[in-house]
Amino acid sequence: MPEEPLLCIKGRQNGANSNSSRISGAIIDCVKVFPERIALVCGRKEHSYDLEDIGDVFLALHPADYENIVAIYAIDDGEQVRIMLYEEEFPGLQEAIEQILKNGWGGFYEKRITSDPIMWLNALCATGAMSGVRNPYVYGFKLHNPKFRRSEGERISRSWQLKDRDDMLRVMAAQISQDAAYFIGKYTNSNMPKKKKKHIENAIKVVTLSKLVSIANEGYACDWLSYEESLAWSLAGSRALRNVCDSWGSFSQYMLDTYDIIKSPNGKAIHASYLNATKQLALLPENPRQLPWLTPLDIETGPDVNAKKLELPPGFQYMPELGSDTKTSSKRFRDAVSALAVFIEAGRCSVEDVKVRLHILISIMQTLIDKYCDDETPEEIRDSFCNTVNEIFQFYAIDFDAFEAWKIHETDEYDFF
């Protein structure tokens, strides 16, 4: 007996247009949903996708014209495909798909339901999800599926000019430790009115930190970062961001203003795209930005490494190889390392949180070396720093090597914009 579909909707025969639902150029005539697969009929040919080959199914708006669509991400002949089914062509499709998703089909809907703190992180980067027709309701904008690992890695490499996981770690650390300062120096000067200069500073901080959180999300989608690593980076960037903005409105305005400040060749197009995506977000029935800007970000990224809030032994020496003098450069190096110890001593941080702090600190140390390294060679500073950090880690039983982390950051600079 033939398998009966849960859903079967035939498309209207309005003739081909730019918004026609297609597969490999062929117009889709009929959508069938079965318990374990989706079948899309094009003329006499049926394209069938088993659940294990479907990365996500969700309701969305087309980025260009706001038309209601159903987006399907699937693997076809080993390659990732994105299929957009237009409500105009398949009347009632969105409502029907929404109902079977809510009834548990495929497990897609259940996986998108999450806590307020996670949804807040999604909301922060949701404009990128809207522009790229990606699911704004799940962390990383796509359900984590190993079959999509390669294609997601390729997409992220193209989008962010990143080669691999180490490249991603370097870039994220630089965004929170160096990039804002560099570009503030590039786009401001001492002759600017204080109010204008402060606004530009804030706008650049917002766009760099927002990029950090977006990349941390993407790192999970392509499996370059574990879920806990991705969260730890996202939280570090988000908490810094909330020191600059006081609402979703101010966040969005700073993002829009940045495109005018930078005046890149594509600035107007990016500005329009961001504004368009923000408007689309507001039209979603469950707009994630309905959450308050100051939603508590109480997310665990692993067990507490210092639940008892132990402190380092009295007289602990930070980078003793620098000598006992108190010259400015030595103090700057030591203060940077002691800040890591203070962070761990305060408790309420996981190993992943500590690793994020270490990567950021290494990026800061490299800036300090370039600016303040006097008699000591960079190698001596590096060795003293890493030995001190490893002593701290040994005291708190943190199994991580600062020297290995430092190696990741020994590379050429990159261009942010």
Image (cartoon, rainbow, N blue to C red):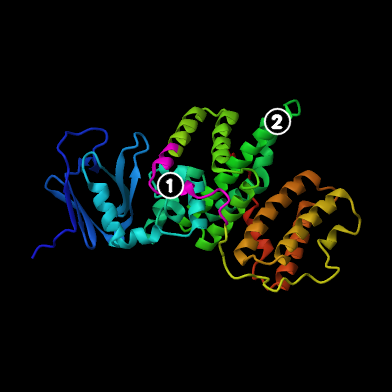
- The answer to whether 172 appears left or right of 197 in the picture is left
- Asked if the residues shown at circle 2 and circle 1 are in contact, with their CB atoms under 8 angstroms apart, the answer is no
Name the quarter where the N terminus is drawn: bottom left
Secondary structure type for disc 1: loop
Quarter of the image for residue 193 reads: top right
Residue hosting label 1: 287
Number of the label disc, if any, that sits on residue 248 = none
Q: On screen, 377 above or below 226?
A: above
Secondary structure type for disc 2: helix
Q: Which residues are magenta?
A: 279-296
Badge 1 density bin: few <14, some 14–19, many ≥20, Cα 10 Å: some
Residue 414 visible at all: no
Quarter of the image for residue 51 reads: bottom left
Q: Is residue 294 magenta?
A: yes
Name which residue lies at 68% across and 29% down.
196
| Percent coordinates x, y for residue 31 in the rendering | 19, 50
Badge 2 density bin: few <14, some 14–19, many ≥20, Cα 10 Å: few
Residue hosting label 2: 195
Residue type at mark 1: give it.
Answer: Asn
Q: Is residue 146 magenta?
A: no
- Residue sitting nearer the eye, 383 or 269: 269
Foreground disc of the pair 2, 1: 1
| Percent coordinates x, y for residue 21 in the rendering | 24, 41
Name the quarter where the C terminus is drawn: top right
Comes first in the chain, label 2 or label 1: 2
Q: CA distance from mark 2 to mark 1?
A: 33 Å
Name which residue lies at 62% across and 61% down.
353
